[in-house]
Amino acid sequence: MTAQTANLQGQVAVVTGSTSGIGAALAEGLAAAGAHVVLNGLGDKNQIEALRSGMAKRHGIEVRYHPANMMKADETTDLVDFAVREFGRIDILVNNAGIQHVAKIEDFPPEKWDAIIAVNLTSAFHTIRAAVPYMRANQYGRIVNISSAHGLVASPYKSAYVSAKHGVMGLTKTVALEVAEAGITVNAICPGYVRTPLVDGQIADTAKARGICEEAVVRDVMLKAQPTKKFVEYDQLVGLLVYLVSDAGASCNGAAFQVDGGWTAQ
Ligand code: NAD
């Protein structure tokens, strides 16, 4: 399904970590399908405002920005409440914010572990916890957690990330069971490698951890895992998201959707 063929007019979507990479693409896709969007994420104020106003103009919908730091429970909860204060409802919640750190377990900084668990896993607990009462009241909701192939399988040197993403899978399945009769679905998208700022940032770290050059990381580590030998494209994730939040996706619940070129089939 493409954003152009779905109809999300009048719906309200919150996308965490949508100032960059996958989150920005997903927010744009929901806006293109007609939803009003609440953006969130870190970054330069002027660039975020340009993203916000450009998205609203391109698609003729309302776009707001909330600066919640996903490491802080109260701010994360307020992001969801803000959507309801601004628009009176929340229909779609996409938990996308994520960070990474690559290091051997014996060198892994404990503060990086805490940060990754907080942003990649605990923030989704807080947004979902805040959003479900609003969704229950409307007897409708779509929650999509952006997990990873690393929510299903592991790679060395990513202990915190793999643990957080496996946690996201457990959270997805548990809440899916709790809200199934309330017209709410909860699913996980598990992308393989997408060439975003987050991935660019880990190429150098992986090269250091493995003692190889950066070209070898792309060829022999990242794309080695992906049988297609191609990075996943933003549009391929947008198409799945739009399907999951549309009426056609109503029976998908508690599921993991791999978009990884066959990585986790191995
Ligand atoms: P990215 O670095 O381009 O974007 C991450 C977003 O999260 C940014 O908007 C950033 O501002 C936001 N963010 C980070 N820390 C935050 C915080 N404390 N509070 C609020 N926002 C914060 O990364 P990306 O590659 O687009 O990753 C997006 C999601 O997709 C992540 O959950 C990541 O784990 C997942 N993912 C990425 C890939 C990939 O190959 N890029 C593969 C699988 C899964």
Image (cartoon, rainbow, N blue to C red):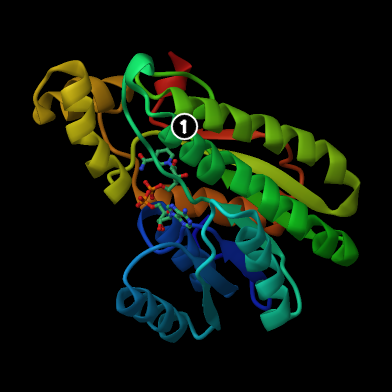
Is residue 72 among the parts visible in the rendering?
yes
Query: Residue at 83% across / 36% down in the picture?
Result: 177
**Which percent across, then down, holds residue 174?**
77, 34
Image vertical order of residue 92 relative to residue 215, above or below = below
Image vertical order of residue 26 relative to residue 120, above or below = below
Pointer 1 residue: 113
Q: Which amino acid does label 1 sit on?
A: Trp
* Residue toward you, 262 or 20: 20
Q: Quadrant of residue 74?
A: bottom right
Image vertical order of residue 218 relative to residue 181, above or below = above
* Residue toward you, 163 or 142: 163
Query: Residue at 41% across / 60% down in the picture?
Result: 25
**Which percent across, then down, holds residue 115?**
47, 41
**Which percent across, then down, holds residue 183?**
84, 54
**Which percent across, then down, holds residue 70?**
54, 54
Query: Residue at 36% across / 15% down in the picture?
Result: 106
Q: How crowded is mark 1: few (under 14 residues within 10 Å), some or many (20 or more)?
A: some
